[in-house]
Every structure is written in structure tokens, then in C-alpha cells.
Image: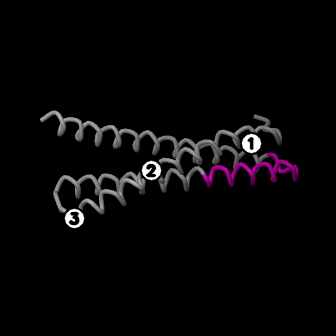
Amino acid sequence: MNVSLTTPALLFPAISLLLLAYTNRFLTIAGLIRNLYKVYKESPSKSIKAQISNLRKRVNLIRNMQVFGILSLFLCVLSMFLIYEELQFYGSLIFGISLVLLMISLVLSIIEIQISVKALNIQLSDMEK
């Protein structure tokens, strides 16, 4: 397959939007952790401790999602540079690795969403009792 200079550039908007979404998720969860921490300090409970533990897992997943997304973007730029320097084989190879890293980031996103939904279902079932 022949990868042109514009092919890796097509991922720039997608990766940028993904990183923005990941950052928003991170900031929201950080706010939740801070609020739960205050509540826990006032009146410790196992439920709040479990929620904080769940949020810790999610923050770590989001960090990894961001790392793989950033590495993907970096490799896209590197592949563009290699293609520009007429090193087509290496540019195509690096672009392929970039796509794999982006897929890993997306898989981690799916896992994080599943953990989030599970946590919400626990909280909803707690409210129904």
C-alpha cells in the first residue's frame, strides 16, 4: 500500500477530538474524586471507599488512553516526516504502528466505559433499595 503525505494527516482531527474527550473524562472524574474524598473525610463509609477505588481504576485507564492517543499522534507526525523525506517504507510502517496504538486507546476507552456503566448500575440499585 502506498501511503501519501496526506494519509497520516487525516488522523489529526480524530485524534485531537479523542484527546479532548479523554481530558474531559479525566477532569470530571478528578472532580468526583475530590468531592467523594471530602464526604469520606466527614463520614467514612465502605460505599464511598469502593466508589473512590472504582474511580482510581478509571483514572488509570484514562491516563493510558491518553498516552496511547498521544503516541499515536506522535507517530503520525513521524510517519509524515519520513514520507516527506521519501522513506516510504518506514513512513508506512510507522503509520501502521500509529493505527495500532490508536486502536489500543479505543479499546481502553471501551473498557473504561464498561466500568463506568457498572458503577452507575451499582449506584442505581443502591437507590432502589
Determine which residue is flagged by label 1: 8
Placement of the C terminus among the 4 image quadrants? top left
Determine which residue is flagged by label 2: 28
- What amino acid is found at the position of numbered circle 1 in the picture? Pro
Residue 124 placement: quadrant: top left
Mark 3 vs 1, N-terminal side: 1
Tag on residue 24? none
Give coordinates of residue 123: x percent, y percent. 24, 41
5 vs 28, nearest the viewer: 28
**41 falls in the magenta region:** no
Q: Residues within 10 Å of mark 2 (few under 14, many from 20)?
A: few
Residues drawn in magenta: 70-88
Determine which residue is flagged by label 3: 42
Mark 3 vs 2, N-terminal side: 2
Distance Cα–Cα, label 3 vs label 2:
22 Å
Give coordinates of residue 121: x percent, y percent. 26, 36
